[in-house]
Image (tube, rainbow, N blue to C red):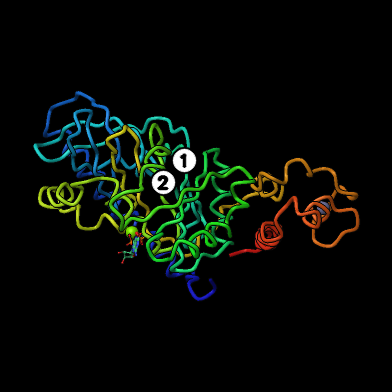
Amino acid sequence: MAGRRLTEKQRQRIARQQDNRRARLSKRVEQALLTSGNSDTLHGRVISRHGQHLLVQDEEGKDHHCLFRQNLGEIVCGDRVLWQVASDDQGVVVSLLPRTTVLSRPDYSGRDKPLAANITQLIVVLAPKPAPTGYLTDQYLVAAELIGVKALITLNKADLLEAKEWREFQQQYAYYEEIGYPMVGVSARREHGLEPLMERLSGETSILVGQSGVGKSSLINALIPHRDETIGELSETSGLGRHTTSVATLHFLENGGEIIDSPGVRSFRLGKITRQQLETGFREFAPFLGQCQFSNCTHRSEPGCALIEASHAGVIHLERLKNFLHMAEQLGKSR
Ligand SMILES: Nc1nc2c(ncn2[C@@H]2O[C@H](COP(=O)(O)OP(=O)(O)O)[C@@H](O)[C@H]2O)c(=O)[nH]1
Ligand SMILES: [Mg+2]
Ligand SMILES: [Zn+2]
């Protein structure tokens, strides 16, 4: 990422601009609260965030365009908040309620930036096209383990392959099921067959992740009939609807589930984690951790390495160990 590194001068200028913008915004927020004279606080759910603007849904299911107090930190899609009405079409978020989980990734400067909050399930979407990279999949699965949410693998675009090829495609990922990650096969293009996915969404707040083009947005469209119309309405009232694919956006399902569409993440890097955390991010390694001959074993080539032995015995999939080693190599490096 060396090409994207900023000079100290550029960094200072950006920081100054951000300070100025924040100061201006703070003034606007306080002004809006003053003029409304209304101090009732209401519960809300953050549907999406566009820069300094939030789309917040109230408890009746109505959406409000909100600013937020600048001392609240990063507010993201899925957050639960308290807010006040400032004017007919605008509110101000005054408090961020505690999160159960937060999914983050490092921004351009390497700082952890939250992407979505209060999720309970991470859904990795794979498709025959664009061809999956196992490395990205495993990074997502490690993230799910570390933040403590369930993970589900969804193979999309079943319609692209003949039945036999599709079975082979599914077979390629069967080892994930053995590890304990459920897998469902679907097609966003077919009218029927989404039930196995729908069942897994019930009662959960799920986030769809995966390469751009695998069909995350199409799946949400297929799961939520009439969604397009709703989006149309939003864009008229707030101007926000049109950009829903460029930011994480929360959607409500008929079965009570909630689902977050995230923008295509080409390279998802884990935040700063320790080697030990990375090891626990591969759930099938658990029985073997601490069993190596050397207590500081890197699991690369040491004699008596329990992980290498397990991979030779076919208990740990070779691809998983390879991806672990690759991730471990990235840990110590500066960005
Ligand atoms: N054949 C087929 N195409 C699909 C399917 N799901 C999505 N697509 C297509 O794949 C492309 C990318 O879909 P999109 O939902 O934007 O992917 P996203 O980037 O993951 O949100 C679009 O051209 C979709 O029409 C599917 O199940 N079958
Ligand atoms: Mg999309
Ligand atoms: Zn080892």
- In the rendered image, residue 222, in percent from the top left (x then y), is placed at 28, 50
- In the rendered image, residue 16, in percent from the top left (x then y), is placed at 36, 59
What residue sits 60% from the left and 42% below the top? Answer: 180
Residue holding disc 2: 207
Left or right: residue 141 versus residue 127 is right
Q: Residue furthest bottom?
A: 3
Q: Amino acid at mark 1?
A: Gln
Q: Residue furthest top?
A: 40
Q: Measure how far apart labels 2 and 1 are at the Cα level.
A: 6 Å
Q: Nearer the viewer, residue 162 or 311?
A: 162
Q: Quick check: 143 above or below 200? A: below
Q: Nearer the viewer, residue 78 or 140?
A: 140
Q: Please tell me in which quarter of the rendered image ligand 1 is found.
A: bottom left
Q: Residues within 10 Å of mark 1 (few under 14, many from 20)?
A: many
- In the rendered image, residue 206, in percent from the top left (x then y), is placed at 41, 42
Tag 2 near tag 1, CB within 8 Å: yes
Left or right: residue 309 versus residue 213 is right
Q: Quick check: 66 above or below 16? A: above
What residue sits 46% from the left and 37% below the top? Answer: 120
| N-terminal-most mark, 2 or 1 | 1
Q: Amino acid at mark 2?
A: Ile
Residue holding disc 1: 121
